């Protein structure tokens, strides 16, 4: 009888491995093996089966990498790594002031942290993907022989400096400002070479053809006008009623909702501004989480700290269509003690990982309880 039960258990286990293998093959069957090329590394996001999406803003492309990092960490240890930038600099043979961390993503399976790093500054900067395991030790992720696929944006802005004097900028560097994955689609925010430059894309994965994006228009209460050229800085997927939405944050700091169903190639849509969270500020990262039966947004900002934003009655939120002096709409609180946060991402059901700057300039990587 025990042998029969063991046989059943082994068969079930083998079937589970078969299903996992089939799922993995589903996502990687159209990938090729080799070394993906990068001009830069910007926003990061995880998809299914340990697949990491890496935005190459300079090339206006997304690269999907099968990391193979699929061993589950059921009870991950709290993460705390002091001066992670100095440790990465030593790993790469550089000084800390020559290391720039442009984004961070936590693998939801292994809970390892992945960092998009630049070694050096300016035109000579070299993009490097770094992984920090739960033991706190950074390592370079070798991309010499990996499974990957690439999606290039067909309507990206030109790679050239525009403007005059101190206002010069290269719009190509904002071709991709944030990315996120949900249910077989990769959502991409950024700028396009259209008159309505601010763009959202809903790209099926595995990648095949990438169509032109959806041009988006918003009313910016702090600026007192409609805008079509300001890029989304960060967004999160959120279900309102039974419909999936993107909640997108812009500089100075409107929060806008877009129904996912309206993101059609070549379309022009108008978002619903549901909050003005304060001007003279740039949002950096945003996640959605639940606590005590309620759902919140957690958003890191350049000059207004980390905000805990309530989503209660978000389905009843009024659209902001008139000038706002500073704040209006969804209420929020600024979290005391959460200072110097450059990036954040969800760690597990109860924790978030932050990359935060100390007074001495070092960057610490640590997990904190969700507030």
Image: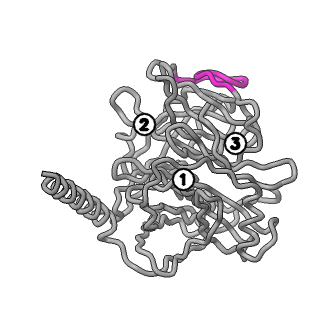
SS under mark 3: loop
Q: Are marks 1 and 3 in contact (CB under 8 Å)?
A: no
Q: Is residue 154 above or below residue 320?
A: below
The CA distance from mark 1 to mark 2 is 22 Å
Q: Picture quarter containing residue 232? A: top right
Query: Which numbered disc, 2 or 3, marks the residue that appears first in the sequence?
Result: 2
Q: Which mark is residue 106?
A: 1
Measured as percent of width and height from the top left, residue 243 is found at: 35, 33
Image quadrant containing the C terminus: top right
Magenta part of the chain = 319-333
Q: Is the residue marked by circle 1 packed among few (<14), some (14-19), or many (20+) residues within 10 Å?
A: many
Res. 249 visible in picture: yes
The CA distance from mark 2 to mark 3 is 21 Å
Left or right, 60 with respect to 338, comes to left
SS under mark 2: strand
Q: Say which residue appears at 39% left-offset and 45% top-offset.
A: 263
Query: Which numbered disc, 1 or 3, marks the residue that appears first in the sequence?
Result: 1
Q: Is the residue marked by circle 2 packed among few (<14), some (14-19), or many (20+) residues within 10 Å?
A: many
SS under mark 1: strand
Query: Which numbered disc, 1 or 2, marks the residue that appears first in the sequence?
Result: 1
According to the picture, the residue beneath numbered tag 3 turns out to be 282
According to the picture, the residue beneath numbered tag 2 turns out to be 245
Label tally: 3
């Amino acid at each position: 009888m025990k042998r029969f039960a063991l046989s059943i258990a082994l068969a079930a286990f083998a079937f589970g491995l078969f299903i996992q293998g089939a799922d993995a093959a589903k996502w990687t069957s159209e990938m090729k093996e080799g070394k993906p090329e990068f001009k830069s590394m910007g926003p990061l996001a995880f998809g299914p089966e340990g697949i990491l999406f890496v935005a190459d803003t300079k090339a206006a492309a997304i690269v999907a990498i099968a990391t193979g990092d699929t061993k589950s960490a059921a009870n991950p240890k709290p993460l705390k790594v002091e001066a992670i930038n100095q440790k990465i600099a030593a790993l790469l043979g550089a000084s800390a002031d020559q290391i720039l961390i442009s984004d961070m993503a936590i693998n939801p399976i292994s809970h390892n942290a992945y960092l998009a790093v630049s070694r050096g500054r300016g035109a000579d900067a070299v993009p490097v993907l770094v992984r920090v395991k739960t033991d706190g030790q950074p390592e370079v992720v070798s991309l010499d022989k990996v499974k990957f696929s690439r999606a290039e944006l067909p309507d990206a802005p030109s790679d050239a400096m525009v403007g005059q004097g101190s206002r010069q900028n290269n719009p190509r560097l904002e071709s991709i400002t944030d990315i996120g994955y949900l249910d077989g689609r990769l959502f991409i925010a950024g700028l396009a070479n259209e008159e309505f430059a601010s763009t959202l894309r809903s790209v099926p994965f595995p990648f095949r053809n990438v169509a032109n994006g959806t041009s988006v228009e918003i009313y910016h209460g702090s600026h007192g006008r409609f805008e079509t050229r300001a890029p989304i800085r960060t967004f999160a997927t959120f279900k309102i009623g039974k419909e999936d939405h993107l909640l997108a944050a812009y500089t100075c700091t409107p929060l806008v909702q877009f129904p996912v169903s309206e993101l059609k190639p070549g379309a022009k849509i108008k978002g619903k501004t549901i909050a003005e969270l304060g001007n003279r500020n740039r949002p950096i990262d945003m996640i959605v989480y639940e606590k005590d039966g309620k759902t919140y947004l957690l958003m890191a900002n350049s000059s207004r700290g980390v905000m805990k934003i309530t989503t209660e009655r978000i389905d009843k939120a009024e659209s902001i269509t008139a000038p706002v002096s500073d704040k209006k709409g969804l209420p929020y609180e600024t979290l005391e003690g959460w200072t110097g946060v450059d990036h954040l991402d969800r760690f597990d059901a109860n924790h978030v990982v932050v990359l935060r700057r100390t007074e001495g300039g070092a960057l610490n990587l640590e997990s904190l309880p969700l507030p």
